[in-house]
Image: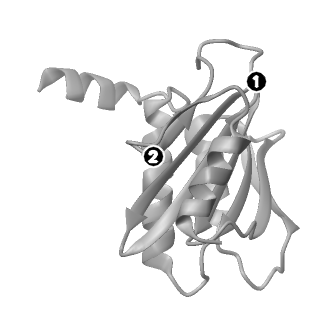
Amino acid sequence: MSSDELRTSFSELAVGSQTQMGSQSGSSGDPSSEGAVQVTCFTDDVHDVTLHFQIIRFSKQIYAWIGCNTAKFGHLYAAATTRPDNRVSVTSVLGGTSDNTGSSMARRLVLKTGLNIVLACNIPKDSPMLEAAAERKLVEKLKGLGYIKPKAGEASASSAH
């Protein structure tokens, strides 16, 4: 599936959302609305590769999909904090255990958001730089949407400049 077909599919998928093809981003809902589901889709070019992202925000969980050049689903991971010591546990829901691309990303997203994370990741396993860049773009978007709150030190440092 080509990038143009994928963008068209994103537009059709984002039910009731407003798609902005100029910035290649679509979003629905307000992050402050507690019970609503918010869907955000965007595309970015990183290291000469087109990455497609979809974020679905539920009340206590985030589903994120990262596609590398295609609309393939990839491996699916679920991550959440576990009791009694609030450590993060990650499991592979779909895909083999030999390819852990995405599992560490899911773990770090739980730590940053405080929410359960379901992450589908279609990034080649031999591309750690691409995986790091994809995670960076996803975290930037999550911060922009208000799903990741800045740490106390970061907020005061950024307001001082």
Label disc, if present, on residue 18 of the rendered structure: none
Query: In this rendering, which labeled residue sits more in front, label 2 or label 1?
Result: 2
Frontmost residue, 79 versus 119: 119
Q: Which quarter shows the C terminus?
A: top left
Q: Crowding near pointer 2: few (<14 within 10 Å), some, many (20+)?
A: some
Q: Which quarter shows the N terminus?
A: bottom right
Q: Secondary structure at mark 1?
A: loop
Q: Is residue 8 above or below residue 69?
A: above
Q: Position of residue 75 (x, y in %)?
A: 77, 69
**Residue placed at 45% from the left, 46% from the top?**
24
Q: Secondary structure at mark 2?
A: loop
**Residue placed at 73% from the left, 50% from the top?**
88
Frontmost residue, 6 versus 30: 6
The residue indicated by pointer 2 is 24
Q: Position of residue 105 (x, y in %)?
A: 60, 60
Relative to 109, 97 lies left or right: right
Q: Position of residue 81 (x, y in %)?
A: 76, 43
Q: Is residue 97 above or below residue 52?
A: below
The residue indicated by pointer 1 is 59
Q: Quadrant of residue 110?
A: top right
Q: Is residue 67 above or below residue 141?
A: below
Amino acid type at image mark 1? Ser
Q: Quadrant of residue 26?
A: top right
Amino acid type at image mark 2? Gln
